[in-house]
């Protein structure tokens, strides 16, 4: 009996080792099994962290989320909410006894909830037509302030005659007279604005305190709980100066509003110091450049004594939060493809604190992350890495600790491709360009592999050393995948970002081709099987590339701009793109628009090219793809068009959309791959 038991245990042990050695590569449906964390909210005393755990449901094709809580030391990790719903935006009260959050748990309608942390009892505070956003606790925890959309009926000059009784007519015509009338991911905009509200934390009806025809930003409370500070663009010419926001103060009783800033340019994200005497905020003096550094300022709470304090840092400042002593702030920034947390004193001394913050999605490897700081200067943040989506980590006095590993179960039987950081010199001007190479799982350096060049959008954004389900699945199908930050990318300073100002696309092409050449020099690339793809700004560059070279076997141009003339008039921000990305309006200088449009070079294209765009994309509308598709067909280029129904610019509003995008790209490349 004892021998039989020993043999059974031995067989189980050997079997488990055999299974461990037979890990397989990622598959498309694994996207449904991947999780990541977002919105880490550390308690005021630093003892606990509430975070959002994001997951997907393969049966309903939905992105879902619940709230979890964990002790700072990593113990007692457990759910606060459960169910196939969306629980987001948790915020601790100042005394740590409660949280508020948004959820659609009751009836599918998003409401503001409050949960008491001793009993974990929750109750809906609102049942309003629109969901509250950007919630802020008063300092005494007796009130909440938030923004909420308030619909407004717009008058129409079109007066339809009365229809006969019983007649069935079409819906009346929609009358539009605003410049911005639709938004990506929003569709055609309803009339109305985001207004400010306050309400008691004991419940009751929210009280509206602004009634203007402008949108109002995130409110924060004054020290005496009598005023709110917020950012907004309340200028009469806001449709034409879209970035010209100010920091304002409003008296919650009288409703009186006072502007605390006045310069041309964005002034955003006010944060009040612990003593209530100083406001920190972000912004810049607008020079109408394509890329302008977001910098950090402080001023007295009455709007006087404005002072730039981040002028020594040639990087964008984001997510500003005061340290407990009020002598400095924590913030996040991107540095050469790495998202970091830094500390800056009010006199401007910058210290790097934490690196390797994780992304907030499963798609492409964009730099992003989130963190919060407690009143004890402990930090909770999203931890990144090329081998896992965002997990939760904490930091205390130079010690950092990872608290979760949400995808270890999946990765215990799936292989991932190794990611190698690369630097090379551009053939145009020898500038150093950064990129990353994902190798196929079980990579063999003696073999040669097909290569995919994948290009980021923006263009003023950056890729980095973070996990990407999209690119890992490409690698899992036997491809080398190269992604890079060509000139124009952020995280390398303002000068590097503005190398494409009024000149995009152009020599970013040389940066990317030099990267392909650098990988080829390693001797691991099958040069007959080079492929290229990218989305948004990456779609622009992909279309530009096939108009400049025939070295690629096939290309997939995703959600691109093809014709700048039509784009600046058809995208969802008509008051922005022409002013910041071009020196003139299209009809004032059509040549500039044409020479920078990939459509102008369609006669050069021989590369088999697929177009891929969401049908409800209002950022780079599908009409751009349709123009290019028609032009390619007229030129008798092998081409196809994939339309993702119901998808906006982000495409992955449903998990299956992300899978559809990947399946389309890989099918096109496989069609033209040679042995």
Image: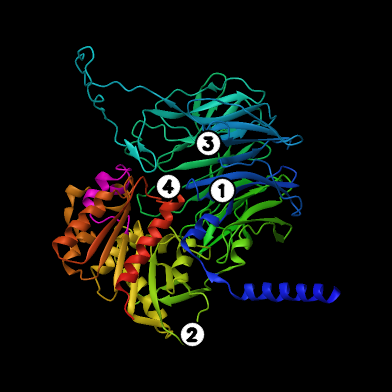
Q: Please identify the quadrant where the N terminus is shown.
A: bottom right
Choose the circle earlier in sequence order: 4 or 2: 4
Q: From this viewpoint, is residue 345 visible?
A: yes
Q: Is residue 517 left or right of residue 196?
A: left
Spatial CA span between label 2 and label 1: 42 Å
Which structural element holds mark 1? strand
Q: Please identify the quadrant where the C terminus is shown.
A: bottom left
Spatial CA span between label 3 and label 2: 52 Å
Residue at image point 23% right, 53% down: 626
Q: Residue furthest top?
A: 165
Q: Residue furthest front?
A: 1
Query: In this orientation, which residue lies closer to the viewer: 122 or 520?
Result: 122
**Up/down of 418 relative to 345, above or below:** below
Q: Residue furthest right?
A: 2
Mark nearest the camera among 3 and 4 is 3
Q: Is residue 125 left or right of residue 47?
A: left
Mark nearest the camera among 1 and 4 is 1
For disc 4, the marked residue is 285
Give the magenta range.
Answer: 558-578
Q: In the image, residue 650 lies at what x, y percent?
A: 41, 50
Dot 3 crowding, Cα within 10 Å, few <14, some 14–19, many 20+: many
Dot 4 crowding, Cα within 10 Å, few <14, some 14–19, many 20+: some
Reply yes or no: does residue 91 show up in magenta.
no
For disc 1, the marked residue is 319
Whether pointer 2 and pointer 1 mark residues with C-beta atoms closer than 8 Å, the reply is no
For disc 2, the marked residue is 445
Spatial CA span between label 3 and label 4: 21 Å
Which quadrant would residue 477 be assigned to in this image?
Answer: bottom left
Dot 2 crowding, Cα within 10 Å, few <14, some 14–19, many 20+: few
């Amino acid at each position: 009996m004892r021998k039989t038991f020993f043999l059974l245990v031995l067989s189980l042990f050997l079997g488990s080792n055999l299974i461990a050695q037979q890990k397989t590569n990622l598959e498309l449906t694994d996207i449904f099994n991947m999780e990541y964390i977002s919105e880490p909210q550390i308690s005021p005393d630093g003892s606990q962290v509430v975070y959002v755990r994001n997951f997907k449901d393969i049966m309903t094709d939905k992105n879902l989320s619940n709230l979890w809580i964990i002790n700072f030391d990593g113990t007692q990790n457990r759910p606060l909410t459960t169910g196939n719903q969306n629980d987001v935006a948790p915020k601790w009260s100042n005394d740590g006894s409660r949280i508020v959050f948004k959820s659609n748990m009751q009836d599918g309608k998003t409401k503001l909830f409050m949960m008491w942390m001793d009993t974990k009892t929750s109750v809906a505070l609102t049942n309003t037509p629109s969901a509250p956003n950007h919630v802020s606790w008063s300092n005494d925890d007796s009130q909440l302030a938030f923004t909420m959309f308030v619909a407004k009926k717009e008058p129409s000059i079109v007066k339809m005659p009365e229809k006969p009784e019983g007649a069935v007519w079409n819906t009346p015509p929609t009358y539009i007279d605003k410049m911005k009338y639709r938004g990506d991911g929003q569709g055609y905009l309803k009339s109305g604005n985001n207004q400010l509200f306050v309400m008691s934390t004991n419940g009751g009806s929210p009280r509206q305190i602004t009634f203007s025809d402008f949108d109002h930003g995130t409110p924060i409370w004054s020290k005496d709980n009598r005023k709110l500070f917020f950012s907004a663009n309340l200028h009469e010419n806001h449709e034409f100066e879209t970035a010209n926001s100010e920091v304002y103060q409003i008296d919650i009783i009288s409703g009186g509003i006072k502007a605390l800033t006045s310069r041309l340019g964005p002034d955003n994200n006010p944060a009040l110091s612990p003593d209530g005497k100083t406001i920190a905020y972000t912004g810049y003096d607008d020079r109408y450049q394509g890329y302008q550094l977001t910098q950090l300022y402080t001023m007295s709470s009455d709007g006087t004594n404005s002072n730039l304090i981040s002028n020594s840092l040639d990087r964008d400042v984001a997510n500003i939060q005061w340290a407990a002593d009020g002598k400095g702030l924590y913030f996040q920034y991107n540095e050469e493809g790495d998202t970091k947390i830094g500390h800056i004193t009010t006199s401007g001394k910058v210290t790097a604190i934490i690196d390797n913050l994780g992304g907030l999605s499963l798609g492409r490897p964009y730099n992003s992350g989130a963190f919060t700081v407690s009143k004890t200067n402990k930090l909770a943040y999203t931890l990144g890495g090329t081998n896992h989506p965002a997990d939760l980590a904490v930091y205390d006095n130079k010690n950092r600790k990872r608290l979760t590993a949400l995808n270890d179960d999946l990765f215990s039987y799936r292989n991932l491709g190794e990611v190698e950081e690369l630097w090379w010199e551009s053939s145009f001007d020898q500038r150093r360009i950064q990129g990353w190479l994902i190798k196929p799982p079980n990579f063999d350096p003696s073999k040669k592999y097909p290569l995919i060049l994948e290009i980021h959008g923006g263009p003023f954004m950056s890729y980095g050393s973070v996990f990407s389900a999209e690119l890992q699945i490409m690698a899992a199908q036997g491809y080398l995948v190269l992604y890079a930050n060509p000139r124009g990318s952020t995280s390398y300073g303002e000068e590097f970002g503005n190398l494409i100002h009024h000149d995009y696309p152009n020599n970013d092409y040389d940066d990317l081709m030099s990267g392909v050449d650098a990988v080829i020099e390693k001797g691991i690339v099958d040069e007959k099987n080079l492929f290229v793809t990218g989305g948004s700004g990456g779609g622009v560059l992909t279309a530009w590339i096939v108009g400049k070279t025939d070295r690629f076997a096939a290309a997939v141009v995703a959600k691109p701009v093809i014709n700048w003339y039509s784009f600046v008039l058809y995208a969802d921000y008509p008051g922005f793109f022409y002013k910041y990305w071009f020196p003139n309006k299209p009809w004032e200088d059509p040549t500039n628009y044409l020479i920078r449009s990939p459509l102008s070079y369609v006669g050069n294209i021989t590369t088999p090219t697929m177009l891929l765009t969401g049908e409800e994309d209002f950022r780079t509308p599908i009409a751009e793809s349709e123009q290019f598709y028609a032009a390619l067909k007229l030129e008798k280029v092998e081409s196809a068009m994939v339309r993702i129904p119901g998808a906006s610019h982000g495409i992955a509003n449903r998990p299956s959309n992300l899978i559809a995008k990947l399946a389309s790209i890989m099918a096109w490349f496989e069609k033209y791959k040679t042995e």
